[in-house]
Structure formats: structure tokens, C-alpha cells
Image (cartoon, coloured by chain):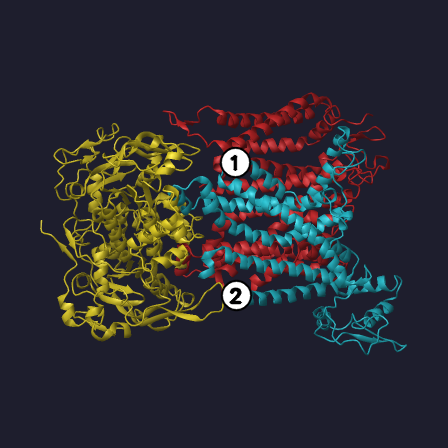
Amino acid sequence: MTKWDYDGPILEIENLSISFFTRLREIPAVMDFSCTVQPGEAMGLVGESGCGKSTVALAVMRDLGKNGRIVGGSIKFKGRDITRMSDEELRDIRGSEIAMIYQEPMASLNPAMKIGQQLMEVPMIHEGVSKEEAWKRALEVVRDVRLPDPERMLRSYPHQLSGGQQQRIVIAMALMSKPALLILDEPTTALDVTVEAAVVDLVKDLGHKYGTSMLFISHNLGLVLETCDRLCVMYSGEAVETGSIKDVFDKMQHPYTQALFRSIPLPGADKTTRPLIAIPGNFPLPHERPPGCNFGPRCTYFEAGRCDAADIPMFPVTGQERHETRCLRFKEIDWAAPPKAARQNEKGEVGRVVLKMEDLRKYYEVRGGALFGGGDTKVVKANETLSFEAREGETLAIVGESGCGKSTFAKVLMGLETATSGQIFLYDNEIQSTPIQSRNTETVSGVQMVFQNPFDTLNPSMTVGRQIIRALEIFGEGKNDAERQARMLELLDLVKLPRAFAERMPRQLSGGQKQRVGIARAFAGGAKIVVADEPVSALDVSVQAAVTDLLMEIQRKNKTTLLFISHDLSIVRYLSDRVMVMYLGHVVELGSTDQVFSPPYHPYTEALLSAVPIADTKVKKKHIVLEGDIPSAMNPPPGCPFQTRCRWKSRVPGGLCEKEVPPVRDLGNGHQVKCHLSDAEFATMEPVITIAAE
Amino acid sequence: MLKFILRRLGVMLLTAFALTFVVFYLTNLAPNLEKLARSEGSVRMTEEAVTAWIEQNGHSGPVLMRYGQWLGVVPGWTFTDEKGVTRGRCIAQDGDAALAPRYCGVLQGNWGYSTVFKQPVGPALLEKLGATGWLMLWVMIVMVPVSLILGVLSGMREGSAMDRTLSTFAIVSTATPEYVSGVVLVALFATATTGLSPLLIDMGLLEPKKTLFLASSTSAMDNITFWNFTLPVMTIALYGIGYIARMTRASMTEVMTQQYIRTARLKGVNFRSVVMKHALRNALIAPFTVIMLQFPWLLNGVVITETLFNYKGFGWTLVTAASNNDIQLLLGCSVVAVLVVLVTQLISDIGYVYLNPRIRIS
Amino acid sequence: MEPLTWTGSLSLLNPVLAALAALLVLAILARIALSFFATEPAVVVNPDGTATAPNGLWSLSVTAGKWLFLSLVGVLVLYIVGGVVTPLGSGGIFGAAAKKFLPVWIALVVLFAVSLRFKRRLGLYGKLFDSTIGMIGFGLVMFWVFTAIFADMIVMHDPLGQISQLKNKAPGVALPDGSGWYIFGGDHLGRDVFSRMIKGSQVVIQIAPLATLFAFMVGITLGLPAGYYGGKLDSGLSFLANLILAFPVILLFYLLVTPEIVTTGLPQFMAVALFIFPLVFLTILLNSRYYVQPQRRNLMVAAVLGIGGWLYLSLISTPGTAVSFFPAAIDLFDVPPNILIVFVSVVFVNSPTVFRIVRGLTLDIKTRDYVSAAQTRGERPWYIMLWEILPNARGPLIVDFCLRIGYTTILLGTLGFFGLGLSPESPDWGTTINAGRRLLTIAPHPAIVPAVALMSLVLGLNLLADGLREESLRD
């Protein structure tokens, strides 16, 4: 079957309902979902995990697995109903008319097949072209996705490529047959920020070039703003608001959308003067949805007897084109009113220096080619000349992408590894070469850690209470079991969890609740320094604010020093006092939040700032796209670690960047930068982010 | 790659030495030697005579020295009796002691003398190994394709009727050790009183007093026929089929849930091609290792089956050697068995690397 | 007296059974054939939320298969009930066997009724009753466990008693004095095959699970540190494990389980080494958790060492052997050396595999954040291994435990088959098969009966493991 022409909308989804059937019950995943994608249009689908956005995408592909069924509504692709197509017809459409790009690029490429073969397969199946023709096309597309050395790429296996390159191959595969509709399911979540920016850029360009319509699924509002023309916000299986980007971002008409925007750290938010407003409560489980409005129980505008009476349909917003909302009260609410409970927090006091690192280095010896043994041992320089200090009650953010050495630094600080050279002072004790077994209880309980992955941070086979009590036992808190039990309950209070949770198993808790338990456990011994390793990055947007808030509150109360490791500059700007930017084991920039977020920047910081998507239409960003990928820490470039991707490199005379590691320079007021650029060049730097006046 | 193989070979040699030493030690324990003395000399030997016999036949001395002699890195023992006749490990019967070599162990190709077969161990073993080789060949020919096909068929659609049926068959066959399946097969196909043969005789399809298959495979030593070889081959293959099919199925179902299979499906590849082109190679990596590591277990099966069907191959020899306290023969059998296991492990490692491109280049 | 027929007065059920079985096979074949031509039709969803498949050939074969299977089971139950209610002998061989197994039936019905009633409260064990495969497997296993427990009530004759007239007589043969029957016939010495099978179950049920448990203790105690620490310790232990694994099992048995070796005392020294592991395991387990509360720790460890140590010393010390130092007055029990050597070699063969599994699981789990959390709060390595890692590896270990009991059963049979270890008189299944195989072409039943028994037990364990695996993966 050949492609057919149709001039209506590319995709029309009407009142789509999808359910999954388990042994016990039917679980509705998507209810009454409608949306339309016009030719050449990019539609964003935004929501938290479990809201059904990926299910919609898979339904368009008719690939819901064994248990999933479309139970109502229709999906029209170019006027033809996909829900009624035979397997044969579906196969014809898949890959040629509708293509999909997935979250995990490594997992979506066949590990045992060369990339060329995987690409050539598409036109060979759908258009029956010859091998030579398919090879030619594959080369062309690989060139289009801006991969170096396309011939070699086609002849390699997926694992030989980096994550960013793999994702480009997946994109190339999707574009092989010039589809009319491209579905992107969180295409950049697994990638580093700077790589993500380049991929997003590519997708946008190619979308225009090939005239493809896009369905872009993401949990990141900023990313949707950068890529899409329209968006649809989903909550708990329903679309709650849909409209053009401009309308939804600036004139939102649904309480959930509003709450979402208020809970993410946008420029201008500040932990003391304009704190985030967390959405209360939890995301309802699919079989525990409330009657009426799904968002009702968490909504500040909730009106009992009305919002929970009956299912609520979508209402068109008058005066705006194709803008709809699923809220009964949208006309009554004053959307411009400032948030009610904008409480102000007093600024935490910064005390004396509690942690000081001087010239810390951590090198690993790694055997080359682990499987075959032998080989030369290579030295991986995970941390190179790290020096900084952190004060009591201060939040120091450590920013960097994968391989920058932030986790190694945490390990050395915790005593899980010992430093190769340099010193770490905790108060006045040197601890750099004391492994954790030899540290005294006070030191151990004084430095604690909050982990990234909420699903991994608690032992799945021990009750929540037992895990906290164990920490108390180890830290020597409490004289007997009864005292420890009481202290454990207090800790649960501290992290705002009901006391009944002590008896629960971790699997009965949501991600945010688990993270709270993790925090309670870290503070069991009255920790003075807490290393938070991306504590909220795996959480849903609406929960992130609450957990961040909690951390800040405990910090203020206990005067804790918080070392906040993150790759997300928005949240870093929101909560940190000082920022340390790391790249390939080096600290490239260190200073107060204001210093780091305004020029002059280190070139890497500049690129990082530009790469982070910001969900605010008023923000104008400078467009800086870094070429290539982050070099491997096993094989760092000579000279400046950043020189392979630096756009300022040409301004430094004599190729100095390739020869020498730059010295640390003080730009005044403790603002340190590791760069060869002259002061004059620094002075020419412009701010990356500007906020347009209202 | 070369380095990897060399390293593996090194570990393999070390393992081989360790294992042969253990076998040597266990077979040359004092009670075994006493038993040997009595069986070679006379049953009514006195304690002193036994001790003397052991000394005169080179079985005394530190065990490491004796192991060295057996290996061929220590000069073989010699003993000159009262009559001035010198005997020794390296001296042939009635041979001239002066002309004999000093070293004559396994490394020199001298595997000792079998007391059961009354012939040197080397040629005896070689002949038996040949017989077992035929058995294994047929087992492989039956087992590998059948099990892989069964595994792939049941793994490609998890939970289908075919999957359930084939899985049940696989579980039943893995739950049936060779000595059970052998007994059941014989009862079903090879007795004149029960099973199928009487039925077939009644129906006139079989000559009276004959059976469908033969319960003894001794005749297969000279001439392999369908009639005398089916049952032993099936007995060994049945267990392996179930095991490998289950492994293949598990591997196949896992591969079928991978993201790249979904990618292929959503590219518009039809189901047949998804299975053949995308899933199969990935799914066969694991079973390949399993098939190779299956050899040690097959060795077990061979021993049981050859004993059960009286097929005089390697397994039968091992049992004979062990139950008759034939130390040299048993040592020879152990060396062969250990080498078979180690070589298959090496092949499986190398093959794994070749099948799995992810490992090859990293 | 007349010899018994197979089904006696219950034979009117035979045609029904045959017809049902044939139809079931047909239905299954039809479904396989259908699956080649048609894909599964889409399920239609009713307004009330239930899903039904539309009528058609496909669903017909599915429902037919289900009902045929159920009615087949029903007919089999009828046989059993018929056998139980009719007087001994009138129900034929099957009827008589069903009647003798009465205590087992009662125990099974009670067990299943209670478990099904409370299955939601019983964790993983309860979930087993959601899977048909798992239930069948569990039923088979428990059948043999109860048989072993009630063996003395079930046997019809002395398992060692010989009646020379009944040598190699077919199943159902009557005793010469008319006092009863050899329902499964007589063996080559004129002993009752049925009673020997029943008594044989005791040997297996006693040794196999216990030996597997010991192998797990050894494997866990060594596998955890190997996986957790890695490095030289891991290389060394892995090398040792591979060494044992490279040994062909039969050869090992032939070398270990011989009378000559027993006289050297080697098995006893191995027992001394292997049996210390449970003691070490329990002590470390308790110490690592309670060392922060010394009083409680001391009490518990002292109790374990006291009781466990006594048991350990009683176990390894046997008068008249190489290891016999424990005064008879406080020596609780003696294990005959030939049983001990069987036990030890089975443990020895199984441990390296368990070691490898535990090591692999440890390597996987030790990268989890909760292990890092334990490390950063200064937990000692053994606490992390035993309380953070081990409980989270329990799923695969439980499944493997079931499989491994089956494997151990096969190994025990192998030993018996080669006449190693156990006495030739022993009624255990392997030895009986070995005795029976020589006359296989003349009288197959003495070998077939224990063979089928052994197979059904191993099959049950395999099905049980499969059911457990399926259910534990379901969450």
C-alpha cells in the first residue's frame, strides 16, 4: 500500500479510552481523551508519570500489549480509523507513515545488528527498494542527523556509539521513510543536558525540513515550550487542558496547570522570598480515582458537591482558538490573582566553615578491556584539584553532567573511598584518608547522604520504621528500644509522614514518600552535613517542590550544610547559596549563585545555562549548542577538559587550551573560574537568559 | 583476544592439574592400594606381604612424587628384586631395564596398564572414546535442533497454547533423569511383555518375540542401527532437550519483551521477520553457553545410559574401572572427563564472545 | 485368591477416562494448530468492565480444553473416592492403592482447604494458590511428603520381607496364603514393590531437603563475601567452585562414596568442615545485627552456639569411626557413615552452584542505593550482606531451592543406581531401580514403580518452582 493523500488533520483522536486488564480488575489508563494534530504541527503531551501520556502514544501505534485494550473512541490517522485496521494495514503504516522515538536509545536498538542494517530495513520493507538504494538513503539520513563519518556509523554496532549518537540513530531510523507523524516518547530523558539540547535542536530542524507532524511526550514543560506549537496537559488519565503553547503557558485555564507552573522553579523564584508552592497530596492510583474531577482532592478551588458530582467534560475557552479545559469553575476563577499563601521564609544564617577541601584528587586505576584481562592499566582522574569550603547552614550546589566526578567526590567525602591526595577537613579533623570503618560514630552520623533513586533508597524487605530504628541503633541514639521507637516516630513527624507509616513496607509508599523516609534516615543521627545526590530528579514535578521544601525546612531548623548535587540548573538557582560547576573531574567555576548565573561565565556554564529548558514564555535564551558528546573520563582530552566542545577556544591565542590545563582565576569576591580566556574576553560575555519585561 | 585465550588456557591447565591430583590422591589412598595388592597378588596375603607388594610396585613414597611419576615429570620408579630382575614403571614386561626411558608418565603418552582389560590404558580408552563419540554425535544431532526449535517456538509467543504445551513437555523431560527415562523407554518399547511391542505383535506389524527397539546396545559397538541405537540416544537426548528448550524459551521470552523488538515491530517488520531477524540471534546467545556447559552433565547421562544399555563406551569403562579398583584406568578416565569439561568451557567462552558483539569490542 | 485387575469394579469409569483424555489431547492439538493460522482475536469489553472473547473456533477450543481438563481431574478423583469407599480389593489395584493412601488424601485436602481459605494472608506461599501449575506442583510434592510421614500406616507388607513364590510376579498378584495382595507386584527377591516404594519415599524426603539446605548455607556463607568484596577472595573462591563444577559428578561420587574412602575417615572430615557452616552462618547473622546491643547479642549467640554446637558435635562424632571424641552419654545421635557420606557428597556437589547463584545476586544487589545507604551510615560488611542483600535475593533463591531439591533427589537416585553408599537392601528409589533394571525385559514393574515415583516428585518440585517464579515476578 502506498501513502495516500489527505488534507485534513494528520491525527484526530476522539474520546479515546484505554484500559488495562489484570486478573483482579480493569484499570482505566486513559479516559475520554481527544486531540488533533494538524499537518506540520508539533503537539506536546505533558503530564507526570502514570498520567497515561505514553499509553496514548502506544495506542496511536496500536501496540498496547496483551492486557491493554482500546475500549472506546477513535483514532483517525489521515482520516482512517486506526482502531479498526487489520494487522496487515497496521504494519504498512508503522514505520512508513507513523514512526516513534523512545526514551532509552540503547534499549531500542538491536544490539546484535549493525546500524546500517537496522536503518536499511525500513525502506526495504515499506518501499521494496534495493539494498544499494537503501544504503544510499541510510547514508543520507545519517548525514541529516549530523553524525560524523556516516559510512563508519552504518557499519558499527549500537554499543560502539555514545548515548547521544544512539539517539540520533534512532531519530534517523524514524525519518528513513519520511513519515507524516513522528511520536517522540521522552526522547531526551536519558541524555545529559547539553546533549539533550543538541538533540532537541535537531528534532526541531528536521521536523521543519521533512514537514513532519510531531507528537512530543514529555514531563518537562520547558522542553515542550521549546519544541511544540500546541500542548495538551494530562492528569491521571485525562486531558485537563489543551491549547496553543502561548495560551496555556500565559493564560492557563485549569487549576492543575496553574499548580504545576507554581511548583516548578522558574527564574525569579527564590527559596526565601518567593518559595515554590507544592501541590498537596498524592497522585491518585488508577483504581482509586475520586468521583468527578480527578484533581479535586488536591485542588485549591475545589467545591464539594459540585466538583465531585459527575464526570466533567472538556469546555472550550471562549475567545481563544482551540483552547479547552476540563474545569467546571474556570470562568469563576481569577487566574491572574497572585498565589494566596506566599509565605516568606527567613533567610537561614550562614555560620562557620564546617567542611573544607583542599586540592583533593581521586584517581582510579582501571584495567583496559576488563573482560580479556591484561591490557594496560589506565588512570582515571575522577577528581582533579578540588578545593572549596562549605559553611554551616549553607547550601552548596554541585552541578555537572555524567562523568564529571560528582559521585566520586561524594564517595570520598562519605569515606567509602579514600582520597589520592589533598585534604578534607570536617570541622578541624582531617578525614580524607580515614575510611568509613575507622571513623567514629559522631563523624559518620554527622555526614549523611540522600540518594537519587527513590525506588532504590529503601531496603524493600524491611519496614520503614525498622530501617529508621536501625540507623538510630548504629548512631547510638537512644538508650533502649522504647526510646528509639519514640525518636523514630518523631523523625516521621519531621518529614511530615503519618506515624502509621512505620509499619509499612517500602513498596506501599509512593516515590515522594520513600524519598521522605530517606531524608528521615539521613537525619537520624543529627547530621551536620547532608549530601543530597539529585534527591528530586527522579520524582514527579508536583512532588519535587514538596520534597525540596522539606529539605530546606529541615536545613533551616538544624542549620545543616547541604551539598546539593544536581544537573538541573533551575532548581540549583532556586535553592543554593553557592554553586560549583564541574566538568570531567575539574571544578570549572565556583561562586555565589548570582555570580555563576550572570556573566562572566565559564564557557561550559554558559552552554549549560543555555541548554536547560525553561518553562516560561517570557524568558529569552541565547542559543548555544555544543557539538559532540562529553568525552569519556577514561580518555580525557589534553589541556583544558572542555576544549573539545568550547566555542570560545578560538579567542585564546596560541592553542593554549589544547596544551595546558588552565589555572584557577579569581574574578573577584571568591568567584573562581578555570579558563584561559582573558579578562577582556570575559567582559564581552552577554547574559544567556533575559527575562522580557511584562 | 589472544591474551584472553592464553589466560583461559592457563587457568584451564591449573584446573586440570588440581583435578587430576585430587583424583590421583583419592584413587591412591592406602585402602585402595591394599585392595589392589590383594586383587593383583592373592586375597589371602598377610599384612606384611601387602605392604611389601605396595613397596615393590612403586606405590609407596610421598604422594606428590608418585603423582609426578604418573605425570612424567619425575623419573619412574624402579625395583630390583632378589633375583636381580629390575622392574619399573617405564620398563616393559620382560624388557631390558637399561634401555627403558627414565620418564614415562601421561606427558610421555604412557597412561599405565589397565588391570581389568589387561592392556595399556591409552589404546583401551581411545577405543571406548570412539564408541562414545558416536553416541554423542547422534545425541547432538537429535538434541540441539529439536530443543532450539521447541524453545524458540514456545518463547516467541509467551503464554500461548503452544508455549504451555511445549513448556509442560520440557518440564516433564527435565524432571526425568536418564535412569528413569531409560527404564521407562525400555518398558515401553523394548520388552516383549509390556508396552507397545506386544500390541504391535498382536496387530501383526512386528514379528513375534521381537521388540520395537533393542534394550541392549552392545551390538551397536560394531554396527549402529536404528533398532539398537534409538533408545540410548533418546534417553540422553530427552533430558537435554527439556533443559535446553527451557533455557532457549526463557531467553527468547526475555528478548521478545525488549525495547528493540518493539522498535522493530513499530518499524512495520512482520512477526516472522521480527522473530527470525531481530530476536533469534540475541536469543541464542544464552542457550549456546548452556549447550556447551551441558557437556559435563551429558557425561553423567552417558555413564548412566551406557551402563543401562550395556554399551561399552567411555561411561561404561569409567564404571568398570571404578568398581574394579583399576587405578590407572580410572585416572585415565578422569583426565579425559576433566579435559572434556574444560575444553567445552573454553569453547563456550570464546563462542560467547563471538556471538555477542557487545562484548567483543568493548 | 484371584489376582487383582487394574481397576476392579471401577472399570466402568475406564471408557470415560479414555474418551476424556483423547478429547483433551485433540483440543490441545487443535489449539496449537489454530495458533498458527489465526492470531488471538481481540477481546470485547462489556459495559460492566469484564472482558469476554467473542465466540469462534478459538474460544471454543479454549473453553473445551478447560472443561475437559477439569472433568478429567474429576474422573480421577472419582477413582480415588471409589477406591476409598469400596472394600479393599474390589476397586482393583488402583482402588486398593487409593484406599491405602487415605491418610495422605485427608492431609492434602485439609492442607489445601486451609491454604486456599487464607491465601491472601500468606504472602508468597498464598500466591502460589493463584497459579494452577504451582498448585499441581505443590500437591505432588506434599503428596510425597505426607506419604513419607504416614509411611508406616500406608505400607501393606514388610518392605524387606521376601516371599519366594512372588518373585517378579505381575502387579495385583495375591499372596500365597490369601491374606492380601502385592498390588504393584513382587520384585526379584519376592518383596512387595508397593511397600518398598512407600518406604523409599522416607529416604528421599529425609535427605534431599536437608542436604539442599546445608548446600545453601555453604553457598550463601561463601557466595555473599565473594560477591560483596570481589577481588582476590572472589577469584580464589570462584576458582575453587569452578574446580568442583568441572568434576564430572559421577566420577566424584565414585571416588568419594566407596567403602575404602569411608575407612580413611575422609567423609567425616568433610562433614566436620561442611556442617560448621550453618553454625557460622547463624552466629554471624545474629552478631551482625545485634552487636549494637551487646546484652541481647550475647544471649542469642550463646544460645545458638550452645544448642547448635551440641547438635554439630553429636552429628560429626560417631563411635568406631575416625571422628569419635564425643562421650556417648551426651552424644545425641549417630549417623551411619554410609548415610553421612551420601549426605556430604550431595552437599559438596550442590554448594558450588549455590555459591555461583548467590555471588551473582550479590553483585547485582550491592549496587543498590540502600546498600550505599547502609555503607554510609557505617554498617559492617556482614550486616550489609546478611540483612540488606540476602533478604532481597530471597525470591530467586527460594525458586532455586525447590529446583535444587529436585536435583538432589536425582543425585540420590543416581547414587542408588550405581549402588553407591546406601545398602543394597535399602528401599530407596535409586537402589530399587538399579535392582530392577537387570530384569527389565522380563518384569519391568519393579523398576518402573520407583522410577515413576521419583519422576513425579521431581516433576512436582519443578512445577512448584515454576509456579513460585511466575507468582513472585507478578508484582
Q: Which residue is denoted by mark 2 in the rendering?
A: B4
Q: Residue furthest left?
A: A694
Q: Residue A230, can we see it? A: yes
Q: Amino acid at mark 2?
A: Phe
Residue A19 disc label: none
> Who's the residue at 62% across and 27% down the image?
C21
Identify the hue of chain B: cyan
Instruction: Residue C193 in the image: state x and y as whole percent.
Output: 76, 37
Q: CA distance from mark 1 to mark 2?
A: 46 Å
Of the chain colours in the picture, the one used for chain A is yellow
Q: Nearer the viewer, residue A618 or A494?
A: A618
Identify the residue position indicated by label 1 in the image: C131
Q: Is residue C376 above or below residue B86?
A: above
Can residue A503 be seen at all in this image of the molecule? Answer: no
Do the residues bearing badges 1 and 2 touch, measured as CB atoms within 8 Å?
no
Viewer-proximal residue, A443 or C306? A443
Q: Where is residue C57 shown, x and y percent of the image? A: 50, 25
Question: Is A130 rendered above or below residue A292?
Answer: below
Within-10-Å neighbours for mark 1: few <14, some 14–19, many 20+: some
The disc labelled 1 sits on which kind of residue?
A: Ser
Residue A135 appears left or right of A244: right
Q: Which residue appears at 64% of the width and 40% of the height?
A: C457
Q: Say which quadrant the C terminus of chain B sits in.
A: bottom left
Q: A347 or C32, which is in the foreground?
A: C32
Q: Nearest to the eye among marks 1 and 2: give it.
A: 2
SS for dot 2: helix
Q: Position of residue A170 (x, y in %)?
A: 34, 50
Quadrant of residue A257 in the image? top left
Q: Nearer the viewer, residue C245 or A97?
A: A97
Rendering colour (chain C)? red
